Image: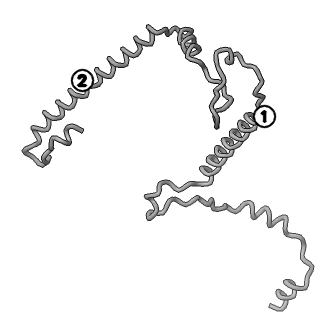
Amino acid sequence: FKHFFHTLFFTKQTNTSHTMSSLRNAVKRVTHKERSQPQSRSHLGLLEKKSDYKLRSRDYHRKKDKLKSMRTKAANRNPDEFYFGMHRSQVDGQSGTNSGRHVRTEEARRIEMEEKGLGPEGVRIMKDQDLAYVRMRRVMDARKVERLQSSLHYLEGGTAGAVTGEEEEE
């Protein structure tokens, strides 16, 4: 025991850090997993993990930077700069937030519709088609209500419960 004690404390030790590091790398490490949402907090939804946070944070900052650059561009905009859209617009004379903005005239809107191939006749046809579609959907829904009501007659004897007229109208 005396010899062991002497060699442990009084002899010059060699550098064993090289052998220790290679042994340390050989040991299997435990992979730490992120926790799941506790059962008592499951009503709050999924627990956000670090990867989810990084994606959300990156997206938030990207949008924030985009808004900041758009604000600076709007602040540095030259109001005297020319755009071809100004030919068919007039300056809004209102006071407040919209003052000094170029607004398209009714003539400009009409010309734009005609360029797209929609004259007053085309707009009328589109409105008629929309009206016909709404009528068709109303008829389909009415038939569906009738079919469901007829299927309820089979259930009235069972445990379906009573259906009042107010609920059917909704």
Instruction: Tell me: 113 left or right of 30.
Output: left
Q: Residues within 10 Å of mark 2 (few under 14, many from 20)?
A: few
Q: Is residue 14 left or right of residue 119?
A: right
Q: Which of marks 1 and 2 is in front?
A: 1
Which residue in the structure is indicated by mark 1? 76
**Residue 56, image x and y in percent?**
61, 47
> Crowding at label 1, few (<14), some or many (≥20) Cα neighbours within 10 Å?
few
* Disc with the residue nearer the chain's start (1 vs 2): 1
Q: Residue at x 77, y 23 (%)?
A: 81
Residue under circle 2? 139
Q: Which residue lies furthest to the right in this view?
A: 12
The quarter holding residue 147 reads top left
Q: Is residue 12 above or below residue 90?
A: below
Question: What amino acid is labelled 2 in the image?
Answer: Val
- Name the one closer to the observer, 120 or 61: 120
Q: How is the image coloured?
A: one colour
Q: Quadrant of residue 108?
A: top right
> Looking at the image, which residue is at 80% across and 90% down?
1
Whole-percent x and y of residue 88?
64, 15
Where residue 70 appears, as percent x and y from the top left, is: 71, 36
- CA separation in Å, label 1 and label 2: 56 Å
Check disc 2 and report its element: helix, strand or loop.
Answer: helix
The local secondary structure at tag 1 comes to: loop
Which amino acid type is shown beneath numbered disc 1?
A: Asn
| Residue placed most toward the observer, 154 or 34 | 154
- Vertical relation: 113 (above or below) 95: above
